[in-house]
Amino acid sequence: MPSPDAGPLDSRTLDGGTATPATATPATATPATATAAGDLSAAGPADLVLGTFSDTPPWLIEPDAMTWRRRVPALRSVTRRSVPELTTPPRVPPLRRMVRTVYELGSAVGLWWLKERRQGNPTSRAALSRRVRVAAEHLGPTYIKLGQIISSGEGLFPAELVNEFRLLRDQVPAEEFDAVRRVVEEDLGRPLEAVFSRFERTPLAAASIAQVHAATLRGSGVEVVVKVQRPAVGTLVRQDLRVMAWLAPFLIGRIPIAALANPPALVELFAETITEELDFRIEAANMLDIAASLAELNQRSFVIPRPHPSLVTRRVLVMERLDGFRFDDVVGMQAAGLDTHAIIRAGMIGFLEGCMISGIFHGDLHGGNLFVRPDGRTALLDFGITARMTPGERHAFLRLLMTASMNDVRGQLAALRDLGTLPPDTDLDAVIRDLNLDGPPVDPTQLTPDELVAEIQKMVKQLLAYGARLPKILMLFVKNLVFLDGAIASLAPGLDLFAEITHLSLYFATTHGERIAAEIGVAPEEYKPDLSGIKASFGVDPNTTHSLTYAELQERRELIRSRLRDRIT
């Protein structure tokens, strides 16, 4: 693992069929490739027309030559079809695994109840979070992955739980090297030394599904990173999903967060996100698709590592090695002369364009999955969770974000309904009336603790009455927004949020105005952002508040949190 005070880092990702391995040669190794690279020396490598890759390729991307790609559509289909089976409560769950799960989680809650429950908040919550995190570690990859997803949900989950589960990102015990060797040799069909002249025994990082090792390809001398799936993780994940599916119906209404989220729906959502991660051929295809999407948008502020032309299997993924600064290394970036404000702005634009225009985006942004290159471009890693929208979902997202910027409450609700958050026959006018969405803004900082809790409980009850749920696409979108929110705190705390939202709105109207007009009927010259609804969502007066820095927003949030802590025991 890199040291906490390190500057530039090497690329690494954290978290599938035997392929016939062929060691790739650098992009200048063959006459044809050398000519292509040489002719484009000023513009960059030839494959930059296919994706947002680095300017120093270890090999060039030639999609038709990547034989592992041919099976990916069928693999995606099989994976999608497996989810209903895995999440339908079985008559009899895997008994040994169920007993282990109940024992670990039950022991965690039971010991907390006996020893720490009466210590008072937040000490009590921190103790419970620690015990649940330890139980997740004992239960292994599936629960560690669930914890990692929760750790990216600051603002969605209790702060103590988020902080504790962040330890799962960098402190997952690594597999023994003999197990890693066995997986690599089984999938590549050759001894490790026949493919790599160097393969570091200690991983760069280890996570729930896989771990990543630095290596050097034999023959070419190209430095790469190798992502290796943990042995038998696929079998264990499927067993755990069946246990979760069996237990989920018994949790409905028994714990507050489960009552809000609908445990069976959460199991289905989690199954959808984790099953595709179990085949690295799907992940490698995701890398190419995201890179192509960004290139089509001319969004060159990002770099995607190139997957190897042939060394990609179900459980092994060899890819280009990159370097850069940790995303929270503000001191290092500023010392290198990088504009952290520009990095945040590019990140927001790229993410929103993926949602609104391309219909595909990285679904698991967190500090371990991206870093900033010395040239200021952001490298994206780990594409196991990638959000792919249907045309209808993308259109709904486009309408959601555009109507939000125009303060069209009914339009936002209609878009949320079309995303699956509300049932198709929902009376939107009744929702607006019941939730008082057309009334004056309520400043939560001016409410007493009792009033604040009552408002939250009232809204949750009303949403549940309408059958509200959190679909996968929206969950990934919100989770990424939460991460970007935290990134602003590190990289640009003085950012004027209202000015930035206006800039983003005008960017989309200018850059994609004709397409947006064709899809939702808003002509570019008629588009005018209205921030009153956004201001109201922050709890400030739309008429008197003209600017709000992120640091000021954080102060308001902390005041709200403190009042909730004082009220909730």
Image (cartoon, grey):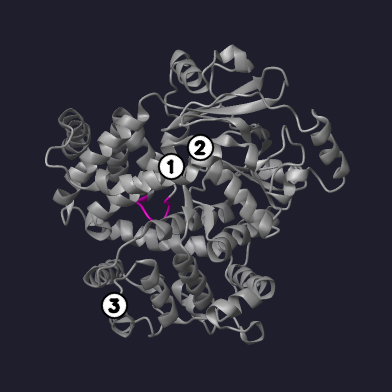
Rendered residue at 59%/70% (across/down): 501
Amino acid found under the numbered disc labelled 2 = Arg
For the residues labelled 2 and 1, the Cα–Cα distance comes to 9 Å
Image quarter (top left, top right, bottom left or bottom right) of the C terminus: bottom left
For the residues labelled 3 and 1, the Cα–Cα distance comes to 35 Å
Q: Residues within 10 Å of mark 3 (few under 14, many from 20)?
A: some
**Mark 2 or mark 1: which comes first in sequence?**
1
Identify the element where label 3 is drawn. loop
Q: Is 427 left or right of 323, judged from the image as shown?
A: left
Rendered residue at 82%/39% (across/down): 37
Image quarter (top left, top right, bottom left or bottom right) of the N terminus: top right
Q: Residues within 10 Å of mark 2 (few under 14, many from 20)?
A: many
Residue 452 position (above or below residue 196)? below
Coordinates of residue 296 in the picture (x, y in percent): 67, 58
Q: Is there a contact, CB below 8 Å, between mark 2 and mark 1?
A: yes
Q: Overall secondary structure of the magenta stretch?
A: loop
Amino acid found under the numbered disc labelled 1 = Leu
Q: Quadrant of residue 116?
A: top left
Identify the element where label 2 is drawn. helix
Name the residue carrying label 1: 75
The answer to which of 89 and 260 lies nearer the viewer is: 89
Q: Is there a contact, CB below 8 Å, between mark 3 and mark 2?
A: no
Q: Is 245 left or right of 329, judged from the image as shown?
A: left
For the residues labelled 3 and 2, the Cα–Cα distance comes to 40 Å
Q: Is residue 99 magenta?
A: no
Give the residues drawn in magenta, as a range.
Answer: 153-158
Amino acid found under the numbered disc labelled 3 = Thr
Q: How many marks?
A: 3
Name the residue carrying label 2: 281
In the rendered structure, find residue 426 and report the number of the disc placed on it: 3
**Mark 3 or mark 1: which comes first in sequence?**
1
